[in-house]
Amino acid sequence: MILEGKNVVLGVTGGIACYKAVDLCSKLVQAGATVDVMMTEAATRFVTPLPFQTITKRPVALDMFQLLGEVDMAHISLSARADVMVIAPATANTIAKIVYGLADNQVTSTVLASTAPLVVAPAMDADMWASPITQGNVETLRRRGATIVGPGSGRLASGRIGAGRLASTEELMAAIRQTLGRRGALAGRRVTVTAGGTQEPLDPVRRLTNRSSGRMGYALAEAARDAGACVRLIHAPTALPPVYGVEMTPVTTAQDMLEAVLAALPETDALLMAAAVADYRPAQAAEQKIKKGAGDEGLTLALERTADVLATVAQEPDGRRPAAVVGFAAETEDLLANAQAKLRAKRLDLMVANDVSAPDSGFEVETNRVVLLTPDGAEEALPLLSKSAVAERIVARVAAILEEKARG
Ligand code: CTP
């Protein structure tokens, strides 16, 4: 939702990656942003303004002396309007001009005139990127507060393999969202999120795990990042791509997760425990593969309890326990009674109760229907929402809890 109604000014400068800016532009519009595109003369050699104009339904600014509307000089009106300014792709030449304050075309003059947060996505051949001049310039931009996203490595237009590819649209979108959210409700807060189903080894080829996909936890990490938080995501193995702008800590077992969470506590203001942590593990993980002959009459596995991460955190002394601790209750019956009991037992500030027996809510789907419970007994039932929308609502509640606690 963070892009909804925002004004994004997208500067496209001349490189082969220009065609990818069309996709970025489309995704920004789909996310609800108003996008104004400006292009350098060189960029128009690679793609014409037409696709941008078609997607944004707005004129593309090409010429510094062009009027957008009746009397608005484009570089002045765009720089004032921008909530965020994005240069993608950014050539070595444009980066250098921005650093030195040159204002010789629509893009550079708009950047110079603007105080909006700046996202720069370099794309160029590997040698230009590796040049100490470019590296120095990029460092200068970073020091001045710009978000530098990419470049990625891989096959370049020249045929060489190296660094210089424009970051993916997903990364660019994430960087733009993170930059827009810098002063959000969780600015300056440190949030630890856990996600995914832990895996408990049975033998070298088998493990006990559960159906958690990790989606809810990943959505929470994104939402917390987009609200300005510094986020660590402690995750069991998942099939999901890493979350941009978030410190990723991979773990496997419940014990690993416990250790990672305890290690993160001194730097955690809010802990969001969305992981599905195994309650039991094989009492002994066999060193060799268990053979079929081991149990002709059937095989009984001996299981032992794992540590409960939230219960352990609940026992931590006050200074070490995060100011906000959020638990998740996945239930198939007696949702609210079970969730209330866990909220009290684990000393939570917020419990997200989730009926996982419904086909549209819970495991392996994009949507969730949850009830938010607080220690005062209040219950807020949210409608069926996407997991990202649920995550935004939870993050807003976490921000409110932290604020309330800070007020004392
Ligand atoms: N949890 C945890 N450590 C465990 C098990 C669960 O920290 N070993 C956390 C989960 O991450 C979740 C909350 O506790 O935030 C509730 O998890 P859930 O599996 O619903 O509850 P349990 O306490 O394990 O109870 P039960 O399995 O009996 O329903």
Image (spheres, grey):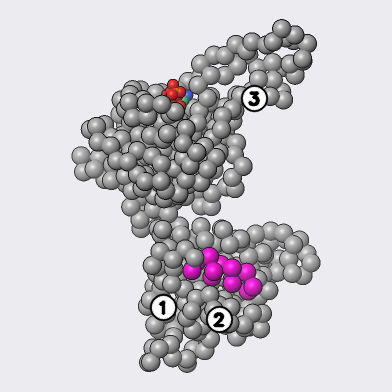
Left or right position of 369 against 98 = left
**Whether residue 369 can be seen here:** yes
Q: What is the secondary structure assignment of the residue under circle 3?
A: strand
Q: Quadrant of ligand 1?
A: top left
Label 2 Cα neighbours within 10 Å, binned few <14 / some 14-19 / many ≥20? many
The residue carrying mark 1 is 79
SS assignment at label 2: strand
Percent position of residue 37, x then y: 51, 78
Say if 213 sits above or below 11 in the image: above
Circle 3 crowding by C-alpha within 10 Å: few under 14, some 14–19, many from 20: some
Where residue 39 is drawn, which disc sits there?
2
- Depth check: give the residue in front, 116 or 372: 372
Q: Which residue is mark 3?
A: 207
Residue in view at x 68 percent, y 24 percent: 206
Q: Amino acid at mark 2?
A: Met
The segment highlighted magenta reads 18-29
Mark 1 vs mark 3, foreground winner is 3
